[in-house]
Image: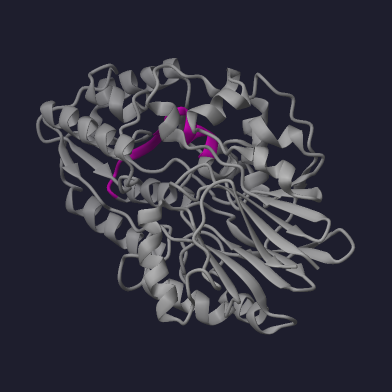
Amino acid sequence: MEVEIATIGGYEAVGRQMTAVRAGDDVVIFDMGLNLSKVLIHDNVETERMHSLDLIDMGAIPDDRVMSDLEGDVKAIVPTHGHLDHIGAISKLAHRYDAPIVATPFTIELVKQQIKGEEKFGVQNDLVKMSAGETMQIGERNELEFVNVTHSIIDAINPVLHTPEGSVVYGLDKRMDHTPVIGDPIDMKRFREIGREGEGVLCYIEDCTNAGRKGRTASEAVARRHLKDVMTSIEDYDGGIVATTFSSHIARVKSLVEFADDIGRQPVLLGRSMEKYSGTAERLDFVDFPEDLGMYGHRKSVDRTFKRIMNEGKENFLPIVTGHQGEPRAMLTRMGRGETPYELDDGDKVLFSARVIPEPTNEGQRYQSEKLLGMQGARIYDDIHVSGHLRQEGHYEMLDALQPQHVIPAHQSLEGFAPYVDLAENQGYKVGRDLHITRNGNMIQLTE
């Protein structure tokens, strides 16, 4: 059977992930993501109203026109998890393919919301829920399997396409968390089995985000302990404390909510995406928040809540807000500009339970946000966080578990691939033979 891979998006920079695998006449697409930074550098861009071709030209979504070179039928579109750099282009591109969107329950709910907000295209693809550990037949000779992984969003998987020539493992995005705050640990047992059954692993496509960092990525349990330590240390402060994290990081939001209560403050979630992700997770029973936890996304509702906090005393509340990357329209950025009823005073604490995504737009926006907050007297606590991506030891462990015949670095720039290439070559792979450095729009023929 012929097996080839189209590397469509995410092979020149982090963002707008998309990869297609053809096994015989069957094609499976993994991820259809958005590069949000390409949108944020423009003022008042509303992607919901834009045509896909304009977004492709902007570099915001994958250029999937290379799909016309794949001789087969798309049988499934498979987003690995609910981050926008993996699902953000589904509402713009999925309607071109007569194939179901197959994802875990939480991811499917987020995809539904993306589609519902779309104003340019009608997306009629079937939405199929499949949980980690389950399989689906793809054509007559191939099978799709979901393997549970841990990441900075719940219900993440690594999909595996089993073919007669061996398995193709799509390894974006994960860390090896054996003590997650929500959900099951990464299923390393299944990865080791896949590496040793049948024809083994034909190809492994791997996220290289932290490949240059030594050691292993810490568990979310470590971030939870760090966060508890910080919040306990300021328990007696009688002014304002504000926290921000990734809205999609439900485990971190859960910890913030719990520790707010521990230090005698009422937590409240503020911002559209904060309300969207936490509300969806609670509705699907992934997390059990207190019944009286307020979640407000609409601007007027948020400002009403800020007024109530000021009237009843900032020392009684912990606002958990959007804006950890300094996004221009997010709550924390508005607070820094003095555009909300919440008034920051000298000594008030702002906790960033997130790292800056290493990309120039984010770094610039975050710098500006911190400076504005500091000008109002806020004290910044940053980097209360652990990454959602593997470091070097995790990469070595995955290569040992899977023992793939071919390896394709992904989810980075050419510069970002370099540490992973060194690591893989240390394990006996060779560039141009079985280690494939590629770019967006390329084809890699694995078997003929």
Is 308 left or right of 349, judged from the image as shown?
Answer: right
Would residue 218 be seen by someone viewing this image from the given angle?
no
Name the quarter where the C terminus is drawn. Answer: bottom right
Which residue is depicted at the point 47% across and 64% down? 180
**On screen, residue 405 above or below 387:** below
Magenta-highlighted residues: 263-278
- Is 266 contained in the magenta span? yes
Q: Position of residue 211 (x, y in %)?
A: 38, 65
Is 274 left or right of 262, judged from the image as shown?
Answer: right
Q: Position of residue 11 (x, y in %)?
A: 49, 51
Which residue is depicted at the point 81% across and 65% down? 142
**Viewer-proximal residue among 442 and 59:** 442
**Viewer-proximal residue among 227 and 87:** 87
**Viewer-proximal residue among 204 and 160:** 204
Q: Position of residue 171 (x, y in %)?
A: 56, 63
- Is 406 contained in the magenta span? no
